[in-house]
Image (tube, coloured by chain):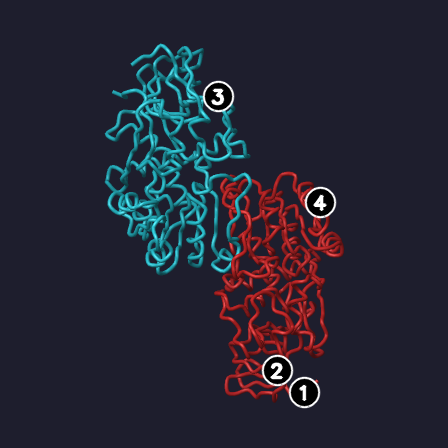
Chain colours: A cyan, B red
Amino acid sequence: MTRTVNRQVLLRSRPTGIPQAEHFEIVESPVPQPGDGQVLVRNLVLSVEPAMRGWVNAVANYSDPVPIGAVMRSLAIGRVEASRAPGFAPGDIVTGLFGWQDYAVVPARGIERSLPPSDLPVTTALGVLGLNGLSAYFALLDIGQPRPGDTVVVSTAAGSVGSCVGQIARIKGCRAVGIAGGPVKQRQCLEDFGYDAAIDYKAEGFEAALDAACPRGIDVYFDNTSGAISDAVLRRLAVGARVVICGTAAVASWDPIPLGPRVERHLLVRRARMQGFLVFDFVKRFGEARRELEGWVRAGQIRYREDFLDGLEHAPGAIAGLYRGENLGKRLIRIAPGPD
Amino acid sequence: MTRTVNRQVLLRSRPTGIPQAEHFEIVESPVPQPGDGQVLVRNLVLSVEPAMRGWVNAVANYSDPVPIGAVMRSLAIGRVEASRAPGFAPGDIVTGLFGWQDYAVVPARGIERSLPPSDLPVTTALGVLGLNGLSAYFALLDIGQPRPGDTVVVSTAAGSVGSCVGQIARIKGCRAVGIAGGPVKQRQCLEDFGYDAAIDYKAEGFEAALDAACPRGIDVYFDNTSGAISDAVLRRLAVGARVVICGTAAVASWDPIPLGPRVERHLLVRRARMQGFLVFDFVKRFGEARRELEGWVRAGQIRYREDFLDGLEHAPGAIAGLYRGENLGKRLIRIAPGPD
């Protein structure tokens, strides 16, 4: 499905909170050609993730903000169409930060890795075997440091990272308690992802359900939300608890910083720890982690769900939908068939 | 100075915030006599510390609250007057939780340790070589994990724990920045305790002074205050920062939990850590730490200040005075001469 124009999703204006469709525009331009040392990639599947909010935000962050007028930054899976770089040939399936567009010209070092043929779907490279699974792996194991018998509570429990955290916690002999929004996701936690207990935070009696699910307190809290969910969890920490801050999906804007109950006394009395996590701090160990995750996926110990949007025109509104919780699984945008 | 009556400071009512003089009363009773396995101790010096607020508070805590009508819990130094327990003889100088009273009858295991004759003042057992110094030692080294060249910021920098933290940070090759209230304590930080910079948080331009003192951000924050001081420090954390929560002196009451700016985003973007600290988790290593602290005190690398109140009648108001910041150094109450 070779195209003669390259559709690109550009950042049109800078949101202060969650990026909405109107912050982007789709433009068309000629398909670019690779220069020396470059590769032309035809994107097949684009990734949508909560971190994109931070990428377009002007507030100081761990990466430079996407400039106004630039192609939206995004992980993608693509097929090499033309190569003027050693090590890459037409037909190769590759992944990297290729952006929300049909075609990307990237330098060889802009390709994160080639994806060899595998019995696992290629899209796992953007989910359970990509940054989602890697985030779950390092956030839980290195920062959360779960011990067998621990009670591990996961917010955004049915999400692409959270669902993986819950399953790794179970693999490590912990009791996994998921918090998710609505009865569908709650059921998904129990039926698809094997949580020992799942709680709908939007339902009446959320705190009582949390008490019932965590009678001995909470040893590890994997936090992807901040906000009221975290406030309830932090009141129930066990002595020596570890809180992993991976995301803050429940906070619409950090400018200005919203108020919440102070955490110092909880941390002091429980001798607990809160620690921020960024997956890119673990790049050198990605290979090791990916091999272990692959093994768990093949063994059926880690299951995953994917949520496909069909067509580039869905990209501008895809982040806002994610924050509204409308996806059931890793959100992806298919823009061309393949890799076959 | 043997007495015929035992004056005791009892907890009369339970404060919700900082204990004031009216929450205590002084009563007289006969001097008790030791039973089998017990020791009669004449208290010489009583300790006053911020943790006492927690000891009298009804809110769940790391120790049972002092019952209404009971002698106020306190560390003290005393002389054994009579002993019916092996290992203790009249004249021994001992320390332990003997309470705010002239005389205590305690079981042998209620004596924390005997204080052998030393070239260092016996009162150091309640300060720099007691829980204050031990808190500084473990909180900074084990939780804060300072590295040479790190910027270490200390709140309550001139206090008995904070001053020790700042000096240990310097011993470990760090840049020590003290935050204290008022010009007298600010000067004390620089002149007595050797901080590289000292900031008066009550003065105009506190945040600008913090920026000037920490141009590369803050690697370790030893927090004894919470509140507005911490809010300012947390905005300036360096990547990988460690925040040690040792006390919350700036928060008058935790019931209900006061609001403050949410910390999750700071921790996430800086991959920083906040962790609560309780010195009693390190009891097994007290001996090791005390030997090292003694060496530093003898070498002049750690200096300390003491703030004496004279007479048991000052005890009821002593905690409130501490929270008002009226002491300059470790607050002690001398109630009898000695040990000589």
* Mark 3–mark 4 distance (CA, rounded to whole Å): 40 Å
Tag 1, which secondary structure?
loop
Q: Position of residue A340 (x, y in %)?
A: 25, 20
- Do tag 2 and tag 1 residues touch (Cβ < 8 Å)? yes
Q: What residue type is labelled 3?
A: Ala
Which residue does the numbered mark 1 point to in the structure image? B3
Residue drawn at point x = 54 percent, y = 40 percent: B239
Name the chain letter of the residue that bears numbered label 3: A
Q: What residue type is labelled 2?
A: Tyr
Which residue does the numbered mark 4 point to in the structure image? B205
Which residue does the numbered mark 2 point to in the structure image? B103
Q: In this view, does B50 lie to the left or right of A23?
A: right
- Do tag 2 and tag 4 residues touch (Cβ < 8 Å)? no
- Near mark 1 (Cα within 10 A), the count class, few <14, some 14-19 or many ≥20, is few
- Do tag 1 and tag 3 residues touch (Cβ < 8 Å)? no
Q: In this view, does A338 lie above or below B58?
A: above
